[in-house]
Amino acid sequence: MTIGILGAGAFGTSLAISMALGKTPVTLWSRNADAALDMQKHRENSARLPGVPFPKLLNCTSELDDIHTDIVLLAVPTQTLRSVLKSAPNLAGKMLVACCKGIELSTGLSPTSVIAEVHPTAIPAILTGPSFAADIARGLPTALTLACADRATGEVLQQTLKAPNLRIYRTVDTIGAELGGALKNVIAIACGAAIGAGLGESARASVMTRGFTEMNRMALALGARPDTLAGLSGFGDLTLTCTSEQSRNYRFGQSLGREDDFDPLVTVEGAATARATLDRTNALNIEMPITQAVVGLLDGKLKVREAMGQLLARPPKEE
């Protein structure tokens, strides 16, 4: 079985490299025709992963009609996922695996829900967990979660997407897996802001821990299983994203804490997710004070020290 991957950013390219090394033919799609030609000619993604050669079984294209595979990975940002799906009617009826983490700002929908809405005959799934593209591309060991509500399809995907350096765990809890991957980006912004403002490692640990509580609070309210958030797609991803400068969300948070400018061309999924989450929590009538503080920082209504002061001033309670 062959695999198609839409999105030739660092993460999509790293998955393509890893899976092609696992002896599975892969077609990698880029919306940029010049970039696709360059990658096919020079056998590397010099813009995103320079120096990492492409395996023989990896080919590149800028034509969506070249994606004939039954399994397609969608490695595009959450906020552009819908437009990519709409531009590719040939994805109907296929197994579509979202490889993005976030909540669509305009609708509040998760990636698999967006897939189901645009292509109702497709079988949606999500691949998520603690991972950096550079690590995967270099062949470093990485464990991920594959969530698919259809158990039989999940088993097929787990076997097909395996690679020498990838260990994939399977679950039917798409709600928990998606929310873990989305909400940890919000908490990573908060942790980065704490470090950027010089509040120290203890403050970061507190934000991570209470942020994890917020993640669980929302996930359980929406029907997720608590053990999912304790796994790779929740606690695992939270730990990685809140402690490494490879994380774009964490670096963005640091810039907020330092009151520096941040490169507007870098995708920061947590910013849109924070706003979408706050809207959802208001409707659910649940408290998520760290998420609320992040939105305040994003809107320029709060400084980091003000936000931390507000969090510390909340009424005492049991943990």
Image (cartoon, rainbow, N blue to C red):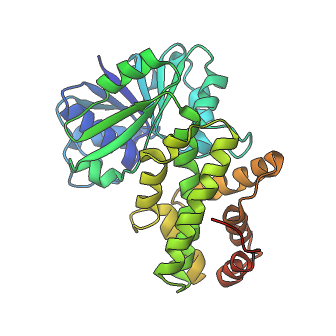
Residue closest to the eye, 241 or 204: 204
Left-right relation of 110 to 2? right
Q: Could you tell me if residue 254 is visible in this image? A: no
Left-right relation of 26 to 234? left
Which residue appears at 62% of the width and 23% of the height? Answer: 116
Note whether 315 is above or below 269 in the view shown. below
Which residue appears at 47% of the width and 57% of the height? Answer: 238
Quadrant of the image containing the N terminus: top left
Residue 110 x/y as whole percent: 62, 37
Residue 186 x/y as whole percent: 59, 59
Note whether 196 is above or below 120 in the view shown. below
Residue closest to the eye, 131 or 6: 131
Quadrant of the image containing the C terminus: bottom right
Note whether 34 is above or below 140 in the view shown. above
Q: Residue furthest bottom?
A: 198
Report which quarter residue 70 is drawn in.
Answer: top left
Which residue appears at 46% of the width and 53% of the height? Answer: 235
Residue 190 x/y as whole percent: 59, 69
Note whether 57 is above or below 303 in the view shown. above
Left-right relation of 274 to 5? right
How many marks do you count on the picture?
A: 0
